[in-house]
Amino acid sequence: MATVERDPGTEFISQVLDGEPALGCMQCGMCAASCPLGAAMEYPPRQLILQARSGNLDKIMDSPSLWMCVACYTCSDRCPRGIQLADDLWPALRDKAMQEGIQPPTELQDAFQNIFKYGNSLGESARKRLDWAKDLDVPLRDLSKEPSPVEILWLVCDYPSYYPRNQVVARDFARILTALGIRWGVLGNKERAIGDCDRLYGEEGLFEKLVEDNKKLFDKYQFEKLVMLDSHSYRALSHFYPRFGAEYPVEHHTTYLADRLEQLKPLLSKPIEAKVTYHDNCCIGRRAGIYDPPRQLLEAIPGIELVEMERNRDHALCCGGGGGGMWLDSHIVEHGGQRLSDQRVQQAAETGAEVLAVSCPFELSRFEDSAKVVGLEGKLQVRDIVELLAESMDLAEKEK
Amino acid sequence: MNIAVVIRQVPDLIEPLEIDASGTSLDMDEVSFLVNETDDHALEQALLLKESSGGSVTVVALDFGEVDDTLYAAAAKGADRIVKVAYDEDRPPSPRQSAAMLAEAVKQLGAELVLVGVYAHDELEGVMAPLLALELEMPYVGVIRGAKAGEPGSVTAFKEFPGAVMAQMNVKLPAVLGILAADQPPRYVPVSRIRNAMKSTEFEEQEVAAAAIAPAVKLQRMYHPEVGERAEMLTGSEDEVAARIAEILLEKGVIK
């Protein structure tokens, strides 16, 4: 019987997407129209599939577009065929490109190399993992030194461990957990990056290594749940790790705290008189449907008036930091794109809010930088929900 | 072209450097290592020459520090052979010792061109690259910022002089080039390829005579930088430090 051979492009996307969905793409253009960076891309999502199906993989891999997706998941969310571009097709193309010697943008290379050598994207020493807790005024259980069963194994993650602005949030979270009487522990200097952005950015080998290393590490300890401040790590652990046989009960800190709202409410004694708007981050929003818990936490704080941006929940604009975007601003701007965080802080200011509340570590630095860039410094504060809770509980650290 | 590349390990400066009880050396228990940056450029230049003009690339390194990680990455990038030279000491050799041992290994390769980083940040006693050329009895050109195949039996090398003046020169082979920077930054190689290299690469282990070279320089004291009389060290919170920096800039008239 005669067989019809598929061209390499069709074969490639068929393998990556497990068969038919991409072949069933009807080129409706919902993905390209909704992509916040699509206008700047040589090959926006619709074109990406078209070119791949036409066998033009080389064209796509040589294009700057390959490194412009920041994994906001809007295309996947809008696609009537359910094609997983951000989770699967973009990363597979990037992996293929890197295997063929195409170089990713240099800032992204640095982040990959830092994670591979040092276990964190910032290129910091593993020995400084616990620096955030140097002046912590509540007891910290470092499981790598005193292994004992805990309710939650808190993965502090890279930015809260090392980045000064996020270290404040980490200390606040430690105090909140302690105030709630939760038995919590951390991995101390043994903790390593989880690797979500690397998965999305096509560094399959690095991601697999991180999964293997982290699985070995987690399996040493007894815990009921993994909890983290980082939405990207949450996404990786809840969605990608199980693909490699590493399955754990995982919870984002906003749902973990919202589940304890009745216990929290009496502790929220200090009013915060402010108009606050909340930014839905992509990993817990569009990808996991976690829209209400962060809002419940904010509304529980006395004095806060919660207002919504025009683009909220599944319509929220991405901060631009996901999927490797933290290390791609220069590349994206060089190729005609805009820093999405600059647009987002303006959308927040349009509500009249004084505070932009966030629930992902990347957003503090991105939005604070953008507020300065667009002239909102001093007018729009960017604060993590954890900071606002700690302040209302009178647990926030005082200015020295 | 048969190219040999010499690669060294140097202390990684992301860790705070500690001085041991002798007061004349780093505390090696607290040091982690990584590839010397200019050696990494030397490898990149060798791979570019091979890709443009053919030939083979052999990487030679002393078995010290975290050299296996570096060598597997080199194999993943495209090095054809990896020669690991036995070295049992727990301290890095001096540049003169390195040059003697590495030269002995390089001599056995019959390389026409030897590429090595022009310096390493832990060289306290001379610079290894020209010493290697001396041991190999080959001419040496340093501070090279790019090279391409020249007429048969030569390479065209680009050397940087002070004031950003560049020179193009024809270098007859055999020769040693001290590389400052390759024609392009060292390439990124995906981790999956490094992991494959870990499974498939066999290092050629080589013994050479230990270099019995007494130190020419006696280190009297190693110490952290001390605060000078005219230095003002800024302390306090980030805000306090930032405010003081702004004050100083105003005081000195840098800003108005």
Image (spheres, rainbow, N blue to C red):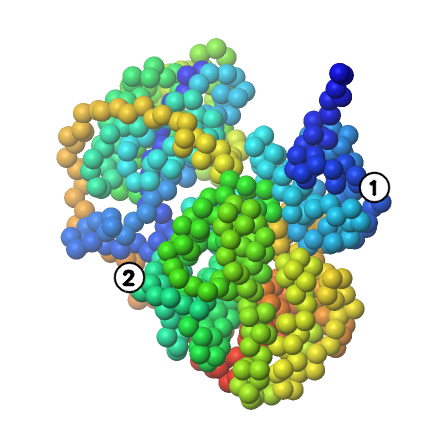
Kindly tell me whether residue B77 is visible in this rendering: yes
Asked if the residues shown at circle 1 and circle 2 are in contact, with their CB atoms under 8 angstroms apart, the answer is: no
* x, y percent for residue A312: 74, 67
Question: Looking at numbered disc 1 in the image, what kind of residue is underneath it?
Answer: Gln
Out of B226 and B86, give the one closest to the viewer. Answer: B86
Q: Is residue B62 left or right of residue A13?
A: left
Question: The disc numbered 1 marks a residue on which chain?
Answer: A
Looking at the rendered structure, the secondary structure element under dot 2 is: loop
Name the quarter where the C terminus of chain A is drawn: bottom left
Q: Is residue B39 left or right of residue A337?
A: left
The crowd level at tag 2 (other Cα within 10 Å; few <14, some 14-19, many 20+) is few
Question: The disc numbered 2 marks a residue on which chain?
Answer: B
Query: In which quarter of the view is residue A151 placed?
Result: bottom left
Q: Which residue is mark 1?
A: A27
Name the residue: 59% across, 74% down: A258
Q: Is residue B144 left or right of residue A108?
A: left
Q: How far apart, in angstroms, are the residues tagged by discs 1 and 2? A: 67 Å
Q: Is residue A229 above or below residue B172?
A: below
Query: In which quarter of the view is residue B177 placed?
Result: top left
Question: Looking at numbered disc 2 in the image, what kind of residue is underneath it?
Answer: Glu
Indicate which disc residue B215 carries. Answer: none
User: Which residue lies most toward the top here?
Assistant: B152
Are labels 1 and 2 assigned to the same chain? no
Name the residue: 59% across, 69% down: A255
Indicate which disc residue B226 carries. Answer: 2
Q: Is residue A139 above or below residue A281?
A: below
> Mark 1 or 2, which is nearer the eye?
1
Name the residue: 37% across, 75% down: A139
* x, y percent for residue B222: 22, 53
